[in-house]
Amino acid sequence: MAKVAVITGAGAGVGRATVEEFARKGYDVALLSRDADRLERAADEIRKYGVRALPIPTDVADAAAVEAAADRTESELGPIDVWVNVAMATVFSPVEKLTSEEVERGTKVTYLGQVYGMMSALKRMRVRNRGAIVNVGSALAYRSVPLQSIYCGAKAAIRGFTDSLRSEIIHDKLNVQLTMVDLPAINTPQFDWALNKMGLKAKPVAPIFQPEVPARAIYFAATHKRREIWVGWPTVKAILANQIAPGLLDRYLAQAGYSGQLTNHPIAPDAPANLFEPAPGNYSAHGRFDNRSRDYSLEMFTNRHKMVFMTAAAIGMAALAHQIAKRLDI
């Protein structure tokens, strides 16, 4: 009997690539996302692998909807073996231009959406004493950047909740694996449909990776006992640099953090914004940066040999901090 995976944010981006990865490995997949048409297309595409695909239109910010999706998955596909929390929302805007409604919505999707997923998954896995939960984090959970305060705050909150839950799982001696996979910049549609108040199109900060890279890391996390996986050198660099010289990075990002996330191309007057409603369109895993994106990473090395790698990386980060200080003339 095939194993069953639930994947949120499954209609596009990293979630869509993760759906493909699990289906290729023979998992039956429940796909959770808001846009029913896009979800159905994604489900149709993975049925070619001979697996069952169950699209369930779900707003992860709604705890009752997430719980209902979990119930339906187990009723139609069987016991949930893996739950992957990918769904996210962001706003490109300085704090002064945000509304309370935008902050609340972005936090509900990105933070509470993962919390509700963990709760629904654990409720079922605890009874069977088996299963794996994978939370998708970000380098920005460790080193926040300007213009994405909602997203950065939510990702940092996910780290805190995940660490608390992990200790409780250990205390209760449960055979439930909980892993966090932290990502660098990924080529997804979010840079086309995220609410943007800057007047210029958004872009990921190079180097950029294709969504299949984190999808492979997420599958690895679900099938191996790892506490955390950092995907790509940019993630390692951001985390370690912030530990060594956070003040320097504050000042560096004050100078480079705006231009690094924005192109020179103006936003169209009718540009989509998916914060409160799904953005219409045939979006898939990839965004518009295919020609600038890498399809490989050393993420498995940084996880399997973390102590040796971190020692070497820390030395490199100290040198980088010195370079930043010279650039900022301090």
Image (cartoon, rainbow, N blue to C red):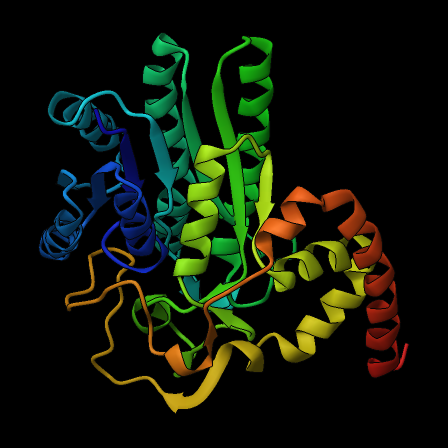
Residue shown at 28% from the left, 35% from the top: 6
For this view, does 149 lie left or right of residue 239?
left
Classify 108 as above or below 189. Answer: above
In the shown orientation, is residue 255 left or right of residue 169?
Answer: right
Examine the rendered structure and indicate whether residue 113 appears above or below residue 174. Answer: below
Residue at 28% over, 54% down = 16
Q: Is residue 289 visible?
A: no
- What residue appears at the point 62 percent right and 58 percent down from the top-left corner? 235
Q: Closest to the observer: 3 or 181?
A: 3
- Across the whole image, how many numbered discs are drawn on residues? 0
Q: Which of the two residues, 98 or 240, is positioned nearer the viewer here?
A: 240
Task: Tell me the quadrant of the picture where the C terminus can be found.
Answer: bottom right
Q: Is residue 144 placed above or below 104 in the rendered structure?
A: below
Is 132 placed left or right of 314 in the picture? Answer: left
- Inspect this view and state whether residue 127 appears: yes
Q: Residue at x 19, y 22 (%)?
A: 78
The N terminus sits in image quarter: top left
Find residue 108 and report its image quarter: top left
- The location of residue 251, given as percent across then percent down, is 75, 71
Foreground of the two, 41 or 115? 41
Task: Give the percent coordinates (x, y) of residue 126.
Answer: 39, 12
Residue 128 in percent (x, y) is at 35, 10
In depth, the one of 39 and 232 nearer the eye is: 232
Q: Is residue 9 above or below residue 122?
A: below
**Residue 322 occupies quadrant:** bottom right
* Residue 213 pos. (x, y %): 45, 59
